[in-house]
Amino acid sequence: MEHQDDEFHTPSSSDAKESVDCIHLDSDSETFEVLDQNEEKGEFTSKVGDISLGMTFDNEDDAYNYYNAYGRRVGFSVRKNRENKDRSGVLKKKQFCCSCEGFYKKKRTPKKKREETRCGCKAMLEIKLNLEGKFVVTNFVAEHSHVLVPASSSHLLRSQRLIEPSQAKLIDQMHSAGLQPSQIFSYFTTEAGGSQKLNFIQSDCNNLIMRKRIGILKKGDSECLLEYFKKKQTEDKSFFYSLRTNEENEISGCFFCDGNSRCDYTIFGDVVCFDTTFKTNRYNMVCAPVVGINNHGQTILFGCGLLDGETTDACEWLFKAFLQAMDGKAPRTIFTDQAQSIAAAISEVFPNCHHRLCLWHIYQNAARNLNHVFSEFKSFTQDFKRCIYDPETVEEFESSWNKLLDDYELRGNDWLEGIYLLREKWAQVYGRDHFCAAITLD
């Protein structure tokens, strides 16, 4: 049955695809045109005027882009709502609304309670196809039933965040070259002249990279990996492996260790180091080895994991697999970098474990935060190294630390004070006086 003009139906996923083109209105002629790619979006937003009945657009995408730009100026996010098509599939009527339109219908109790954003807002824009093939604004509601977003934060609205194909390609190339997501986003922010002029945020950049990792293990590679693990298990009865899959039953992580590693852990496993600095070249997965030292001061491998990302869920899964492989024996102390996702996973899986920061990462942070001091004083590098690495007691460290602050007039430095407030401690281990100087996170 053919839809009538006053009826709507829910748009399909293909219809709901948002256009990346930008349009603006010429106030003199009321005609619309696509913006040049070099034209800044901030200038485009300033050109958008008020909306009135009778305004015409060449197509629905032009209407959406104009209403979305209007939403950015006013301070609300836009959503494609209802539409009406004839039997041949030609669009006759379309409605765009505020993202706060309607109310949520809970089909089941969510695992995580989230703040509800829909409050029944009536703001909307409705367009209808006329006899000339143009879309005319037939209904417009400007009033909102909620607080609008200030101009300084309007770039964070969902409908304003869209990574363009050219940007996505550049992000992929930069990530393939070894740049971190934070470095990639920092580059785009600088190029745009500030985060407010950029059309996406850090999480959008991270999600784009993560989506490319989801299907990285092809079917043939997954089967080869599984066959390899099974072969190793026939050769070594103590060989352990565990696989992590996503919702589409694709491998998104694995953990493995052999019999020698499990035996070494029973003897030397009180202190371990978990590092996610490394990445595989072909699949761009995070390589996460779990290492320690033996009584000769030699580095030994307790196990290794491959993860699709350094998220809390991924780290929790790896730590649980590690516990299973080691018969439930948790380490007493674990050294990691400063990633919050790893810290959260450790507190969840190893609640009684002492979590400390690795000295190597502390020194790298010092090089970034005290760059001006390293450049001005040539002797500071050696003095800072001696302060960090040489002391063997807490008292010796505090004495060296205070001398360093006085010699280079660094008292009042926020980064140094933050490091000191975390309190320097030492981890005792097997016949050696000390394993490593560390900063506790307790």
Image (cartoon, helix red, strand yellow):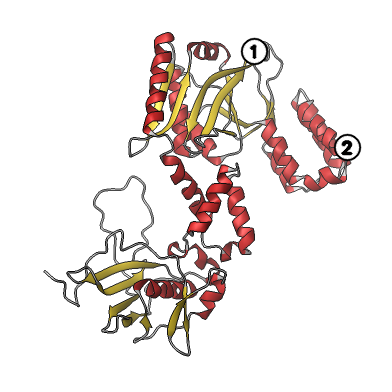
| Residue at point 49%, 46% (across, down) | 209
Q: Earlier in the sequence, mark 2 or mark 1?
A: 2
| Residue at point 27%, 60% (across, down) | 12
CA–CA distance between discs 2 and 1? 35 Å
Q: Quadrant of the C terminus?
A: top right
Could you say which quadrant of the image residue 272 lies in?
Answer: top right
Is residue 237 in view from this perspective? no
- The residue labelled by disc 2 is 379
- The single residue placed furthest to the bottom in the displayed view is 28
Q: Is residue 87 left or right of residue 79?
A: left
- The residue labelled by disc 1 is 430
Task: Give whichever of 336, 133 is nearer the camera.
Answer: 133
Q: Is residue 66 left or right of residue 355?
A: left
Say what amino acid the circle numbered 1 marks. Answer: Tyr
| Residue at point 52%, 37% (across, down) | 284
Residue 245 is situated, as x and y percent measured from the top left of the image, at 37, 33
Is residue 118 in view from this perspective? yes
Q: Is residue 422 left or right of residue 251?
A: right
- Give the SS element for disc 1: loop
